[in-house]
Amino acid sequence: MTTRVNRRIVLASRPNGAPVPENFRLEQAEVPSPAQGQLLLRNLFLSLDPYMRGRMSEGPSYVAPVGLGEVMGGGTVSRVEISNHPDFRPGDVVAAYGNWQDYELSDGTGLVKLDPALPHPSYALSVLGMPGFTAWHGLLAIGEPKAGETVVVASASGAVGSVVGQIARIKGCRVVGIAGGEDKCRYVVDELGFDACIDRRDPDFAATLKAAVPQGIDVYFENVGGAVFDAVLPLLNVHARVPVCGLIAHYNDTALPAGPDKLPLLSRNILTKRIRMQGFIISDHYGPEFMEFLRQMSGWVGEGKVKIREDIAEGLENAPAAFIGLLEGRNFGKVVVRIAD
């Protein structure tokens, strides 16, 4: 090791609305020493994902919040530095659920060894990891796309949405993406092969979306909410399916949105159109499904049928700014922090 310092980013205070840099604090500690049966991991890449905003708040959710003064958590790709564990050797590269820090101790639980020949180890945090698995399960198990149907994908240039749309194309669907800005929309169509992409910032967004789906929407993959869902709702067909994996437009809300109560309108559409709208948490599905996902997705990536774009921030110290940018939509692709080479 070149240093005996373990930098780590802790939650300094809870956000009131959108996170700000002052909610985070960079600390230094001694690099821990592994006991018998443990490993010392050097984190190489850190995944930043929208769900982390929920863990910064104190309210109840499907996972416990980060405590004040505790290290922020997240998926990592890490190298084994020291091993006192029979199943791992120094130099092994693994995918793990770790923390926003340079070094980790692990007892080996949950670690997945990565192929040394993998050209992009960080893909284990995107298309071959949690975001790709979220797209695969949500679309195929809940969306159940059929050839010829119309699939609409929110946040279409992001880590999950980009993969959803490409899988839908593989399944023979017409795919319309929604993204923020002309550059992202151009990428979604020209590089990822979507049939169309609508700029959510367009003043005539709702009308433009309607024109892009003349046959209505059979599957809408929801990870945004807000005005995007308001425009989608009247376009959903009878027996439409709506997998819900996130609502990033509302993560910084401190109160209910102003305006009329839209619950009766949503409920009436769900009833009269027999819409299936189902939320899911991808961590519930790793045991029975992940290896089949990995087999299938690895094949698609190897054949060039599924692509991913990474938005890489350099240095652990820049993780808070990159995370704030992710929540503001300033990223272009899957946000990853390169902590070390």
Image (cartoon, grey):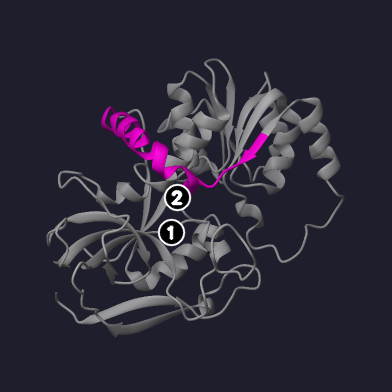
**In this rendering, is residue 333 above or below 340?**
above
Q: Is residue 113 left or right of residue 287?
A: left
| Circle 1 crowding by C-alpha within 10 Å: few under 14, some 14–19, many from 20 | many
- Give coordinates of residue 21: x percent, y percent: 51, 75
User: Can you give x and y, in whole percent of width and height, for residue 31 in the image?
Assistant: 24, 79
In this view, the residue in front, 232 or 256, is 256
Residue 40 in view = yes
- Residue identified by numbered label 2: 332
Decide if residue 175 is on the left or right side of residue 7: right
- Residue that carries the numbered disc 1 in the rendered image: 48
Which quadrant of the figure contains the C terminus? bottom left
Q: Is residue 292 magenta?
A: yes
| Label 2 vs label 1, nearer the camera | 1
Secondary structure of the residue carrying numbered label 1: loop
In the rendered image of this protein, does residue 196 appear above or below residue 18?
Answer: above
Q: Nearer the viewer, residue 316 or 110?
A: 110
To which quarter of the image does residue 318 belong? bottom left
The answer to whether 108 appears left or right of 212 in the picture is left
Q: Assign the magenta stretch its main secondary structure.
A: helix
| Residue at image location 50% in from the left, 58% down from the top | 326
Which segment did they paint magenta?
277-303
The local secondary structure at tag 2 comes to loop
Q: Amino acid at mark 2?
A: Phe
Is residue 239 shown in magenta? no
- Closer to the chain start, of discs 2 and 1, is 1
- The answer to whether the residues at label 2 and label 1 have Cβ atoms under 8 Å apart is no
Q: Position of residue 145 (x, y in %)?
A: 54, 23
The residue carrying pointer 2 sits among few (fewer than 14), some (14 to 19) or many (20 or more) residues within 10 Å by Cα, namely some
